[in-house]
């Protein structure tokens, strides 16, 4: 009996074990099916996403033929670059046309397994991922040249999973569709290489003034070095940084056994094209002004152009520096802005400074701001008097007066009684000038100002003689040029010639017809009077030890301070003030503007 019970218990246990195993088997089967379903769903999702990325790829033909903004290169009088607007491309250069060391430098730097991978380099990708993980941020890229072509040619630089997936799909398509040499040609002709240049030929012409077919080994290393950070490592941004980066590229080439150490050492002794100053500094305001004028000369266009201008690099850089230094030294005087225009006697713009710092404000105070000229307007009054038969040594009374409720005063609150016209202008006496203007036809004063270059509205009021209306800095420079050149009308201009990139001339400035608007006699007398302003009057700080004539100007409450004048060579208008029109402290036309004018003219 005991034996039978024991056998029964064993049988029950075996059945239970079998049932348990059966349940576990069913559960494993269920889990396996769930896992298969999960992976199946994942695969379907991935395939669907890949299909979505593929179907939303940009049109290949459209991307290859994508239009771009034509480039406009602004060139100074000495041939140096001022600024380029738009993007610069050049002729297509095939990879096989370049020296082998050019190709070696680029491949060694950007994608050393370019000739062996299928568009994606798993080794470079893994290395970059590890480096980025350890750094905790993006420090290294693993894209192949083919991937970069895919991105540059068809996609945007936006960082997203979709864009990266499409980049890979396009890279595989490019590898299937084109040979390695064709992919490399696409890359070399589309890659950005700093300073607005796209493609190796455009960069070579820009930086070294030669074809990419003629690059030496050092120049090839500089080009290859730019690919890491085009805006930082190009020779325009910093020649020394470009050379330091080139040395790194050459060392990589040695390690990749594409050149020897001796080749590297020899390359480091080579020069980078002809020695030259690449870019005119601090001329952005001028460049913007010229660029906005170009279409008025040649109309709309779809080709790249060079605009040859009248800008004098030396004058431009010194004018900008003089303004910046003066503002920096006089912060306690609450003066934050300024503008300068320098013209020659024909009206050609030789220098233009539109503000203290272009990076902070692109508003051009030389051509756009409207400011009161103050006493810098007085020469128009005295010119009109000379035209009406007055002489510089004629007498006028400098005494208190009132016109209606208006009771003007001299700047120093003094009265000088009977003075000559010459003395009144030299000392910038307000009362004498107003007294003179009251005996002149005001409409003729306004007519003179307009004919000489003032383009803003002038209202016929008693205070117009003291410059109570608003003018542009460039207009004041233009008007004084008519005095400087003996009485001939001018128009401020900067564009001399315009060429297409292949050398076809689109525009050439002709010789202006001489249009005398002031008599030689009147201009000579006024010039002598303005010379006395610097000899013994309010403009003494502008004296340069040779012929100079000009006039100071200060508006009410010292909101504007001017010096406008000329030498045997140039005319310059200098304005200081604040954009919010707040008064300056102890700043008048007779001090800081006159000192800036002197620095420029010296």
Image (cartoon, rainbow, N blue to C red):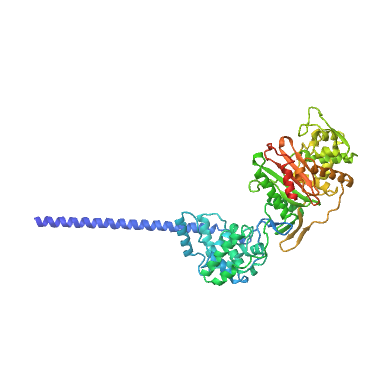
- Residue 399 position, x and y percent, is 82, 30
Residue at x-position 65% and y-position 69%: 214
User: Left or right: 246 with respect to 24?
Assistant: right
Q: In the image, 601: left or right of 264?
A: right
Q: Position of residue 523 (x, y in %)?
A: 86, 45
Nearer to us in this view, 525 or 19: 525
Q: Is residue 542 above or below residue 313?
A: above
Q: For this view, does 49 lie left or right of residue 472?
A: left
Which residue is more in the foreground, 58 or 364? Answer: 364
Residue furthest to the top: 405
Foreground pick, 553 / 206 = 553
Q: What residue occupies the far right of the structure in this picture?
A: 389
User: Where residue 521 sits: x, y (%)?
Assistant: 89, 46
> Can residue 323 be seen in the rendering of this structure?
yes
Q: How many marks?
A: 0
**Residue 544 at x, y = what percent?**
77, 48
Answer yes or no: is residue 259 visible.
no
- Quarter residue 507 falls in: bottom right
Residue 416: name its quadrant.
top right
């Amino acid at each position: 009996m005991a034996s039978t019970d024991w056998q029964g218990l064993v049988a029950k246990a075996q059945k239970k074990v079998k049932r348990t195993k059966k349940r576990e088997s069913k559960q494993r089967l269920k889990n396996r099916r769930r896992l298969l379903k999960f992976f199946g769903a994942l695969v379907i999702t991935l395939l669907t996403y890949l299909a979505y990325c593929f179907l939303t790829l940009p049109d290949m033909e459209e991307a290859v033929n994508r239009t771009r903004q034509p480039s406009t290169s602004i060139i100074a009088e000495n041939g140096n670059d001022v600024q380029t607007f738009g993007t610069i491309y050049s002729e297509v250069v095939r990879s096989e046309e370049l020296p082998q060391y050019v190709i070696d430098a680029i491949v060694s730097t950007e994608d050393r397994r370019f000739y062996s991978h299928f568009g994606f380099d798993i080794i470079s990708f893994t290395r970059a991922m590890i480096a980025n993980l350890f750094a905790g941020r993006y420090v290294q890229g693993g894209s192949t040249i083919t991937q970069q072509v895919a991105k540059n040619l068809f996609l945007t630089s936006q960082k997203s999973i979709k864009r990266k997936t499409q980049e890979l799909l396009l890279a595989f398509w490019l590898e299937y569709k084109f040979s390695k040499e064709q992919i490399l040609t696409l890359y070399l002709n589309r890659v950005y290489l700093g300073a607005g240049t796209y493609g190796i030929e455009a960069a070579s012409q820009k930086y070294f003034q030669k074809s990419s077919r003629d690059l030496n080994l050092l120049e090839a290393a500089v080009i290859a070095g730019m690919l890491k950070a085009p805006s930082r490592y190009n020779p325009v941004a910093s020649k020394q940084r470009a050379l330091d980066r080139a040395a790194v590229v050459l060392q990589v080439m040695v390690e990749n056994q594409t050149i020897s150490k001796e080749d590297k050492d020899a390359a480091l002794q080579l020069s980078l094209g002809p020695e030259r100053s690449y870019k005119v500094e601090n001329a952005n305001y001028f460049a913007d002004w010229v660029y906005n004028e170009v279409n008025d000369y040649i109309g709309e266009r779809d080709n790249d152009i060079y605009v040859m201008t009248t800008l004098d690099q030396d004058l431009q850089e010194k004018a900008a520096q003089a303004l910046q230094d003066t503002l920096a030294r006089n912060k306690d005087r609450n003066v934050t802005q300024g503008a300068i225009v320098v013209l020659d006697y024909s009206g050609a713009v030789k220098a233009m400074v539109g503000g203290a710092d272009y990076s902070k404000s692109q508003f051009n105070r030389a051509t756009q701001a409207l400011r009161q000229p103050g006493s810098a307007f007085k020469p128009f009054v005295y010119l009109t008097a000379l035209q009406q038969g007055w002489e510089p040594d004629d007498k006028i009374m400098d005494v208190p007066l009132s016109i209606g409720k208006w009771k003007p005063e001299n700047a120093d609150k003094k009265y000088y009684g009977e003075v000559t016209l010459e003395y009144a202008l030299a000392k910038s006496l307000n009362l004498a000038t107003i007294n003179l203007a009251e005996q002149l036809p005001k409409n003729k004063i306004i007519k003179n100002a307009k004919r000489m270059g003032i383009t803003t509205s002038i209202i016929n009021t008693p205070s117009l003689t003291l410059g109570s209306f608003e003018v542009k800095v460039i207009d004041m420079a233009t008007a004084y040029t008519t005095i400087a050149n003996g009485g001939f009308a001018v128009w401020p201009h900067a564009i001399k010639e315009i060429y297409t990139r292949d050398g076809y001339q689109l525009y050439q400035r002709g010789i202006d017809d001489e249009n005398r608007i002031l008599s030689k006699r009147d201009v000579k007398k006024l010039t002598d009077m303005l010379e006395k302003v610097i000899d013994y009057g309010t403009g003494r700080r502008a004296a340069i030890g040779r012929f100079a004539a000009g006039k100071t100007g200060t508006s009410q409450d010292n909101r504007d301070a001017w010096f406008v004048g000329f030498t045997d060579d140039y005319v310059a208008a200098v304005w200081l003030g604040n954009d919010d029109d707040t008064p300056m402290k102890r700043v008048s036309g007779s001090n800081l503007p006159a000192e800036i004018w002197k620095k420029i003219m010296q």
